Amino acid sequence: MTGDQDTPVRADPDVVVIGGGVVGLWCAHQVRRRGATVTVLERGELGGPQSCSHGNTGFVGTHGAAPLAEPGMLALAVPGATDPDSPWYIAPRADADLARWLEQFRRACSADASAAGFRALIGMKKRGLALLLELCATERIALESPGIVLAFKTAAGFDAARETVERTVAGGVPLRVLDPGELDVLEPKSVFDIHGALYNPEGAYLHVPDFVVEFGRVLRDSGVEICARTEVTDFAVRERNIVRLNTTRGELRPGTVVVAAGAWSAECARLAGVDLALQPIKGHSVTVERPPSAPRRPVLLSEAKVAMVPLGDRLRIGGQLELTGMSTEVSERRIRALLRTAREYLPALEQTPILQSWSGLRPCTPDSLPLIGPAGDLRNLLIATGHGHIGMGLAPATGELIGQLLAGEQPRTDPIPLRPSRFGGSAT
Ligand SMILES: Cc1cc2nc3c(=O)[nH]c(=O)nc-3n(C[C@H](O)[C@H](O)[C@H](O)COP(=O)(O)OP(=O)(O)OC[C@H]3O[C@@H](n4cnc5c(N)ncnc54)[C@H](O)[C@@H]3O)c2cc1C
């Protein structure tokens, strides 16, 4: 019997992690290194396209710590307020959970809430980068650190961004304005049609999904059992304890259950009677053969909220934020929009064959802070989800926090702002 593909070998591990995306793997890693036996249950293949950790752009540096909810985003709290071709789109539909989430999002758009969110997220990202550097150096996993260019097509976009530089630097992100000559030196083969650019030298990124597959290998070597193609279908609860998990490959009786099932965490937690304030925000990516004039480092096409990242002989272009429910169907229209946007910023970019079109569901909370910790009145359930647009960067500190909570250690990351109960409901 092989633990990575078949029926779980251990029927009663200390900890079961539901979900083999980047968050689940970091939880398993940190729990295992504290001595517990761990089994990861993953519905698809590890690193497979069902997971949001499959086709994303892999940024893990200090870039991107601003919550999606910020003062300028209030207009988005109205379903249907945006058009399907804009970077943000909310499909109009009657959905009580979505309406509640949007109301909580609206509240999180205050300047104070947004600033507090940034402080929490940048702290987690910085800790995450340190943990990643350690893991990738020890295990010889690729982590690239060439910095990131933030390109602005419009004068208005660039001017607004320039005004935030001082505040962003004070918040711990080493952002600076690039003059056009500097951009030519950084990217000599690329021709930009933009108004201006900023640069963050701490722009690091992972090759996705290779990172997930490699991390899985490291975990198996350390004794973590990873069961792919194994779906959790039900929980049995007795006297405030989860006493049994039913899966498509039999039953397990773990000591503790960690729900790290990404956008599916809400339906998973509901099996245990716990409601989570979570909505899937869909994004697309397209991976092409690398055009000769492609940038050598990641570039954010800022107004469009689209990112470009070189992956060896490939180039991935990804982005878009759609509140359109749980469907992962790829929209050709959205893929064409990504390619069109890339050429708006880089008109000379050669057309090359498309290698993969993909969409993924970001597990998003109203305030962009993840949900980490106990939930409901169950004694042996922990939640680790809600990492939204920056899960690759937040996952290491999440795993560490879960490991510390389970081991009764002093947490390095403050768990209070991350409590799953902070939006009320049955996660209290
Ligand atoms: C276009 C795009 C670009 C992005 N770019 C970046 C970026 O540059 N940097 C960054 O930090 N983040 C980025 N993100 C966000 C990032 O991808 C996510 O935050 C992250 O992958 C979430 O990881 P996760 O482990 O929580 O979820 P997932 O990776 O989705 O993993 C959850 C897993 O749980 C499994 N599962 C669900 N239900 C069950 C069940 N009942 N039983 C067993 N298994 C189950 C699923 O199959 C899935 O594999 C991007 C996202 C998108 C869409």
Image (tube, rainbow, N blue to C red):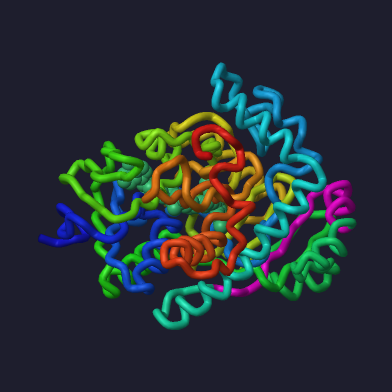
Quadrant position of residue 416: bottom right
The structure residue drawn at horizontal position 75% and vertical position 40%, both measured from the top left corner, is: 109
In the picture shown, does residue 153 fall above or below 408?
Answer: above
**Magenta stretch contains residue 151:** yes
Q: Could you tell me if residue 48 is visible in this image? A: no
Q: How many marks do you count on the picture?
A: 0
Residue occupying the far front of the picture: 239
Q: Is residue 225 magenta?
A: no
- Camera-nearest residue between 57 and 109: 109
Identified at 62% across, 61% down, the residue is 414
Residue pictured at 85% horizontal, 57% vertical: 164
Taking the spot 54% from the left edge, 45% from the top edge, the residue there is 420
| Image quadrant in which you'd find residue 70 | top right
Residue 138, position in %: x, y? 43, 82
Which quadrant of the rendered structure holds the N terminus?
bottom left
Q: In this image, 62 relative to 353: left or right?
A: right
In the image, taking residue 62 as reference, residue 133 lies left or right, namely left
Percent position of residue 105, x then y: 68, 36
- Residue 407, position in %: x, y? 42, 67
Q: Residue furthest bottom?
A: 138
Residue 262 x/y as whole percent:
45, 46
Front-most of residues 167 and 254: 254
Q: Is residue 124 shown to the viewer in this render?
A: yes
Left or right position of 346 against 56: right
